[in-house]
Image: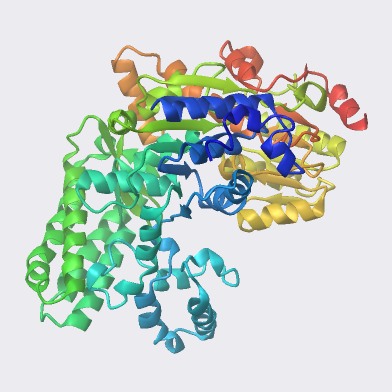
Amino acid sequence: MANLIADIGDALKQGGAFDSAIDSFVPRQVQQEMATSVMDAINYLGKLVVESGTGTGKTYAYLIPAIVSGKKTIISTGTRHLQEQIFNRDLPVVLGVLVADTKVEMLKGRSNYLCRYRHRLNGQQSDLVGKENALSYDVLDSWVVSTRTGDIAEVTELNESSPIWKQVTSTADNCLGGKCPDYSKCFVNQARKRAMEADIVVVNHHLFFSDLTLKTDGFGELLPQHEVVIFDEAHSIPDIASGFFGFSVSNYQIYDLFEDIVSAEKEEKSGAEFRKPIARIEQKLSNFQGYMSKQDKDSEILETLRSNKFDELLDNLLEHLNELDAPLTAASGVGENLARCLVRFEQLSGQLSEWRESRDRNHVCWLESGRSLVRFHQTPLNVGDHFGKYLEVPGISWIFTSATLAVGNDFSSFCDKVGLQEMETQKWDSPYDYLNNALLYLPTHMPDPRDGDFAESLCQLILDATHASHGRCFCLFTSYSMMNRVFERVAGAIEWPLFVQGQAAKQHLLQRFLEADNAVLFGTASFWEGVDVKGEALSCVIIDKLPFDYPSDPVLKSQLKKCEEQGGKPFMDIQVPDAVIGLKQGAGRLIRSETDKGVLILCDPRLISKSYGKMFLKSLPPMPVTRNFSDVEAFYNG
């Protein structure tokens, strides 16, 4: 293989191996340079951080070096959808051109695989839970006979949100492990065995950091030993990793544990009395939840919640929770299910006690509450404090890549967040012709977003812009409240098919948007990234305001406070860089191919009125800027 491609850059040039083998391949200088840099980082055990703009071909630029190197490689990306795309579409093409015998596998989290034991156990009762459930089991019964992987994504006949999946998949909490009667045929174990033998394993960030957590806790590893780690969509790492380097405990987890304890006792018959203490705990949890629902605080730091009443209700809950310790400990020797319930109980009660004390100044303890939810969080203030030590493990090359990592040409914000100390950073802009195919419109008449007239002005701008673009528009909002407020005002006035987030599942909305051809779609955070609409169907992107995170967010509030205590400038050091990356993600929805054309409309006047606005504008692709709406109309007419 090394002889086949002596120079990766040459293989990607015009007339090279990929140009000769793939009809749709477009040679790009930026792709050749990135592939060479990735190869160098792999060969010399480096740390490389790469911003690679839309259309640079970054996936091939890291897959080819990974395969050619022959080293054990983990490729981690942001979502399961992207994970499947890399494994099922991109890797087969690259392997075919290289004529490589590299062994590749895809590994997902446990909940993505059918559990044979739970499928059989619950399937025996499917006639008791309704006709629809019984039909779902019929589909699964036919599929399980032929599937090799047990990956539930193969079952396209059932909705991914179907409640049946909870019945037929396992979690780390309820898995019986080696004592399961179906252990030898377990799909999860089979997938892990294949991954251990593979040269390249494709995972997602959630699974990668779950593996790190297991290693820290001294339990079994999910991923094989590796020499190279490549993070695609690396910009999402800090948020995802924070959930694994901290913890959260919800009332639903507690209720699930209680349900499993009762079920395990019914099956294994220890003779212990669980129903009465469980009923008392549920009552205390209900009292605490009722108190929080009256506080009108969706999320708040523990220190600001403390009061005599709060402490009394919380202490009552923890005191009654401990009543389960003795009977569950005594019962745990009777059977495996009760023993696993004890392990879960000890973890949950230990985490709640730790949360109550809140002694770690490097973490923030905060509470999330709603009508039916109470969730206790402990979140690290800096993921890099935890992740950085793994980046110093000898013998591993680390590559981080995304279309949005830098603020201008500065990567320091991202590198600090993940704990990168010594690294090489490179940036390759999109090769697409923004100068001729795009236009940035900054309206002159928009009030400050905090002004009461902002929504009304935004409505009129959306009506004018969608009329000029003949629909074909994404309207991206920073909050549900503003999105719904504007939607209610313009729904009867927009002359094109209009969709709004929440009407249906994300993928279904996108499909309807594409089928309509000239539709308008209103969306919030989930539509700012990971959405790829090529062609004329999307010719306008309107963004309501700069995507600053709300300073009332408990984690951000604590991060800002710590930054200030250490002599930093919280707004410029944290809030602005994060918002720049967010804006780049939203703006990146507009031009997705060489032939795409469109107008980006940014409605926030602070881009011009505030000095920091220049940082946002410099981070966007180079495109003509106008403040006259007549230029927008001329763009579409032309």
* Nearer-the-camera pick, 4 or 537: 4
Quadrant position of residue 16: top right
**Percent of width and height locating residue 248:** 30, 48
Residue for point 37% across, 42% down: 299
Marks counted in the figure total 0
Q: Is residue 225 left or right of residue 404?
A: left
As drawn, the residue found furthest toward the bottom would be 127
**Percent of width and height locating residue 432:** 74, 28
Quarter of the image with the C terminus is: top right
As drawn, the residue found furthest toward the right would be 638
* Nearer-the-camera pick, 498 or 83: 83
* Nearer-the-camera pick, 8 or 121: 8
Q: In this view, does 115 lie to the left or right of 341?
A: right
Q: Is residue 382 visible?
A: no
Residue for point 86% across, 41% down: 470
**Percent of width and height locating residue 435:** 78, 21
**Percent of width and height locating residue 167:** 40, 73
Q: In this view, does 108 lie to the left or right of 624?
A: left
User: Compared to 500, does 269 lie above or below?
Assistant: below
Quadrant position of residue 533: top right
User: Compared to 479, does 324 lie above or below?
Assistant: below
* Nearer-the-camera pick, 612 or 174: 174
Q: Can residue 577 be seen in this view?
A: yes
Q: Is residue 573 left or right of residue 89?
A: left
Quadrant position of residue 587: top right
